Amino acid sequence: MKGLAIRNQRAFASGALFLAFAVFFFVTALQYPAGTAAKMGPGYFPRALAIVLAAIGLVVILSAVKPAAEAQALRRWDLKGLAWITGSVVLFGALLFPLGLVGALFVLVMVSSRASPEFTWTGALANAAVLIVLCLAVFVYGLGLPLPVWPSFLN
């Protein structure tokens, strides 16, 4: 009998990542009581979600080893792009209270857009404007989260 060959490395890696997150969240949720379907405890939903995540991961892994799967190699990581994205999120966290949501989101979009070789200033500015309007509408006005909207020196 012939062994299983990973034909689609990208799908296999994605499925393995889903599975790893599922195991992590399931094990973490074990410290909370699950309860029952009628009276759910704090561990019920995370465990259920972890099971669904694991099922998705297994389906993706199995599809990657099927003989009919499209052969795709795993690409090298773009470390420069990863650094731009990670740095922009760290900057957002650091700048949220001094610059407010508007300023921090603007910096987030402008810095993270540098991760793409298709970067254009006009595209990044348009993206920032749309994201700022949506985040203000959803988080500040819709959900009423007490986030600073404008820089603290303007208050």
Image: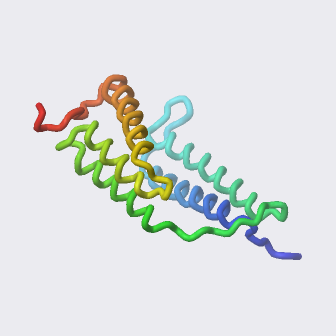
Q: Identify the image's colour scheme: rainbow, by chain, secondary structure or one colour.
A: rainbow
Q: Which quadrant, please, contains the N terminus?
A: bottom right
Q: Residue at x 63, y 58 (%)?
A: 15
The answer to whether residue 16 is left or right of residue 149 is right
Residue 118 versus residue 34: which sits nearer the camera?
A: 118
The answer to whether residue 71 is left or right of residue 105 is right
Q: Position of residue 33 (x, y in %)?
A: 45, 44
Q: Residue at x 21, y 34 (%)?
A: 150
Residue closest to the far right: 1
Q: Against 15, is 74 above or below?
A: below
Residue 44 versus residue 51: which sits nearer the camera?
A: 51
Q: Position of residue 60 (x, y in %)?
A: 69, 55
Q: Against 50, is 150 above or below?
A: above
Q: Which quadrant, please, contains the C terminus?
A: top left
Q: Position of residue 143 (x, y in %)?
A: 35, 26
Q: Position of residue 121 (x, y in %)?
A: 39, 47
The answer to whether residue 9 is left or right of residue 80 is right
Q: Residue at x 37, y 33 (%)?
A: 135
Q: Report the number of discs.
A: 0
Residue 50 versus residue 74: which sits nearer the camera?
A: 74
Q: Against 80, is 154 above or below?
A: above
Residue 24 versus residue 109: which sits nearer the camera?
A: 109
